[in-house]
Structures are given as C-alpha cells and as structure tokens.
C-alpha cells in the first residue's frame, strides 16, 4: 500500500475520509483541540522528577498547547511558578491561541520574563512528546484517529505556511510532491501510533 501525505492543522477543512464517521479528524489532531474528555491529564513535571510512579501527581490542561507553553516558563525562565497559570485552575483562558500568545517571546519580554532559548530548545521535543503521549493514553478519539491513520498508511504532515523553515510542520511542494519542513509534530504523532 502506498503512503499518502495528509496535512492537518487547527483549521483543516472537514472531510470524512478516514472511515470513522468524524469529518473533523484533521482538526482534532491539532494541539489546539480540547481532548474528548474535556481536559488533558499530564504528570506534573515539578513534582514527579524524583518520585516513584505510584506517587505521580497529575495536572489538568485544556489543550496540548497550554501544557507546551506552560513548560516554557517552568523549564526555561527564572519564573517557573508562572506555569501554574496554564493549568485548568490557572488564570490563562481555555483558548489555546491565548495560551500560545502568553508563551511567546513578545509576551514574555513585554511582561518582564526572559526565555532561555537554548535551554528551551533542549527540552521542547520531550515536552511535546510527553503531552502527545498523555493525550494518546487519555483521549480515546485521538487514539482511534492515530491508529486509523496508521492502518491507512497515512503520512501526517502538520501544515505550516513557513514550510521549509518550519520545525513543527511543513507543507507539500506542489511541483515535486515532496514534504518541505522538518515536521517534528507529525513525526512524533506517527511514532506514537506505531507504539500502540
């Protein structure tokens, strides 16, 4: 069976072509989507680094995006306590666009925070994988979609307009049909589904 490239992002067009009676499956793969259980449950990185599995404390987040942006503060700023604002009990709105904006360099600079970019770059892949694995293990619809994309031999490409410059996604070159961009988000999703 040939591999088919499928692009996804938070505003993907509705198309029921996966065979699960859910046309918004491409949108649902986005980090901006709330999981079917309404919250994302992830081990708390501040408490769990030195504890046994039986003592793991979990925090609830609206989306993967909330967790990802929270970890910037926790792991790569001098204000790690600010990460608590991103969880379900925090002050950051449930809207993932606001979470993303609050984690941006512009917001940080304007509000007196400083992101250690080199340090964050050393953590960001692990943070993303942790969030996506947690979503896979706690969100049955997300898991169903990923397994179905594996069964249908689909290459998952997180669409980003910056294409060849993109780290988390990319685009398809209309002339060659090749993927431009690193597509790290798509790669993590495909790795997770293989391990299912």
Image (spheres, rainbow, N blue to C red):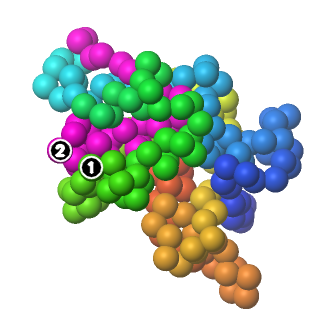
65, 17: nearer the viewer: 65
Q: On the picture, is 67 further left or further right than 157?
A: left
Q: Give the crowd class for mark 1: few <14, some 14-19, many >=20 residues within 10 Å.
A: some
Residue 99 showing in the rendered view: yes
Q: Which residue is mark 2?
A: 78
Up the image or down, 179 lies above or below 23; here it is below
Q: On the picture, is 32 further left or further right than 84?
A: right
Is 196 included in the stretch rendered in magenta?
no
Q: Which mark is residue 113?
A: 1
Residue 133 showing in the rendered view: no
**The furthest residue to the top:** 54
Q: Which mark is residue 2?
A: none
Kindly indicate the quadrant of the structure image that contains residue 4.
bottom right
Which quadrant would the N terminus be assigned to in this image? bottom right
Q: In percent of the image, x 70 and y 60: which residue is there?
A: 6
Q: In percent of the image, x 34 and y 28: which residue is there?
A: 84
Up the image or down, 157 lies above or below 134; here it is below
Q: In percent of the image, x 61 and y 22: which residue is there?
A: 38
**Are the two marked residues, 2 and 1, in contact with CB atoms closer than 8 angstroms?**
yes
Residue 63 locus on image (x, y percent)? 53, 34
Kindly indicate the quadrant of the structure image that contains residue 109.
bottom left
Q: On the picture, is 136 further left or further right than 38?
A: left
Residue 34 locus on image (x, y percent)? 61, 31
66, 50: nearer the viewer: 66
Residue 51 locus on image (x, y percent)? 16, 20
Is 68 included in the stretch rendered in magenta?
yes
Q: CA distance from mark 2 to mark 1?
A: 7 Å
Q: Which residues are magenta?
A: 54-80
Q: Nearer the viewer, mark 2 or mark 1?
A: 1
Task: Looking at the image, tell me whether mark 2 or mark 1 is earlier in sequence order.
Answer: 2
4, 188: nearer the viewer: 188
Up the image or down, 96 lies above or below 89; here it is below
């Amino acid at each position: 069976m040939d591999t088919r490239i499928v692009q996804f992002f938070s505003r993907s067009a509705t198309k029921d072509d996966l065979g699960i009676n859910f046309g918004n499956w491409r949108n649902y793969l986005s980090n901006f989507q709330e999981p079917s259980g309404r919250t994302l449950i992830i081990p708390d990185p501040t408490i769990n680094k030195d504890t046994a599995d039986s003592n793991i404390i979990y925090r609830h987040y609206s989306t993967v995006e909330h967790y990802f942006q929270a970890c910037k503060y926790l792991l790569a700023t001098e204000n790690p306590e600010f990460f608590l604002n991103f969880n379900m009990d925090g002050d950051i709105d449930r809207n993932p666009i606001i979470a993303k904006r609050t984690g941006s360099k512009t917001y940080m600079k304007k509000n007196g925070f400083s992101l250690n970019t080199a340090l964050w770059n050393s953590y960001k892949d692990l943070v993303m994988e942790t969030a996506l694995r947690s979503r896979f293990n706690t969100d049955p619809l997300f898991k169903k979609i990923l397994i179905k994309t594996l069964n249908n031999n689909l290459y998952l490409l997180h669409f980003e307009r910056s294409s060849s410059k993109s780290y988390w996604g990319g685009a398809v070159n209309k002339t060659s049909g090749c993927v431009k961009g690193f597509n790290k988000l798509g790669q993590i999703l495909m790795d997770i589904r293989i391990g299912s």
